[in-house]
Image (cartoon, rainbow, N blue to C red):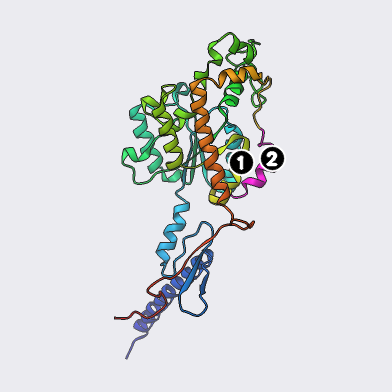
Amino acid sequence: MITTKYLFLLILITAGFAFILLYNWFSTKVILADKQLTIHLAEGNNEQLIHSNVNHWQTSTAKVDDITTYRNYDEKFVIIYNRVPKTGSTSFVNLTYDLCKKNAFHVLHINITANMHVLSLPNQLKFVRNITAWDSMKPAFYHGHMAFLDFSKFGMPSKPLYINLIRQPLDRLVSYYYFLRYGDDYRPYLVRHRAGDTMTFDECVARQKPDCDPTNMWLQIPFFCGHHAECWNPGSSWALEQAKRNLANEYFLVGLTEEMDEFIELLELSLPRLYKGAVTHFQKSNKSHLRKTKSKVEPAAETVAKIKESTVWQMENELYEFARDQFHFVQKKLRTPGRNVMQDFMYEKIKPNPNGAAKN
């Protein structure tokens, strides 16, 4: 005969098993519902069509652990925005700072001694290890004026997503020329390096002064090229080709300064974990034109023609056009040709049938 003590113990054990079963069943239902798993049977056969909603992996045989792993991937995002000076980066970064609290991610500025664009070799290793292992800061958005750094070179198990903005090279040079003399409306009381110098860009080019030398345009190529010595050699064909390879293969997205709205739209569609609500916020806030040079005179046609004769301009412009074509290609592929419908994809013709009984 079972005593009261053993009967009570038996009830506790039974209740414990029941709780575990209910918990596992409930967890599976919640996670699958959250992933919006939609399974449709094809007409006339038993093949499943598994539709993929944007930003979600879906498989008919997915286990709870697999789906949880994918969900955790969003929480380990690391984005590096190695911002090129005078490409509209202040506006974009301030938008990101506005979103970080709402969307629960971290934003960190990379401040390198003396505004150097290349890290020393020991600092490269420290930087790569730190970003990879600093889980308490993930999801993370790092930004700073730093050349591209290849994480795979250091044997890291994962790589961050690189993004950037690129600007027409002469526009960037002219903007920077007047910025050094007159500053901008972002920090209007800060005295710049060339304050008091009223020489126009046209006059500078006519007199062949150093501040308007075409070699000063050699910046976007080395920023995309990286930490190799040849990247910083103005006029290097190798650097240009390396910059193009990195832009195509290592960057998640490179936008255009003059099309920043479209750049932000693509980020919101692709990376909603960080950029949900970015388009609306950017349009309604005052962040879209945050930093304007106080005084800028557009160069004369003769000046533009002279600058365009230089090899450096031609190479920097080639990189810009390469980036522009890629950006517009990505935009075009967002929607179904001939219809204003977002592109989608699905899995089909899955064998063996995941829901069918296993056959020997």
Tell me which residue sits at (40%, 34%) in the image.
149
Q: Which residue is mark 1?
A: 98
**x and y percent of residue 150 in the render?**
38, 37
- Which circle's residue, 2 or 1, is located before the other in the chain? 1
Q: Which mark is residue 285?
A: 2
Q: Spatial distance from mark 2 to mark 1, Cα to Cα? A: 10 Å
Q: Is residue 275 visible?
A: no
Vertical side of 129 occupied by 74: above or below: below
Q: Quadrant of the C terminus?
A: bottom left
Q: Quadrant of residue 99?
A: top right
Vertical side of 56 occupied by 90: above or below: above
Indicate the secondary structure of the residue bearing disc 1. helix
**With 316 as the anchor, is 132 left or right in this view?**
left
Q: Which mark is residue 33?
A: none
Relative depth, front residue between 167 and 206: 206
For the residue marked with disc 1, what is the amino acid?
Asp
Q: Is residue 276 magenta?
A: yes
Q: Quadrant of residue 282?
A: top right
**x and y percent of residue 77 in the render?**
46, 47
Relative depth, front residue between 338 and 106: 338
**x and y percent of residue 23 in the render?**
45, 71
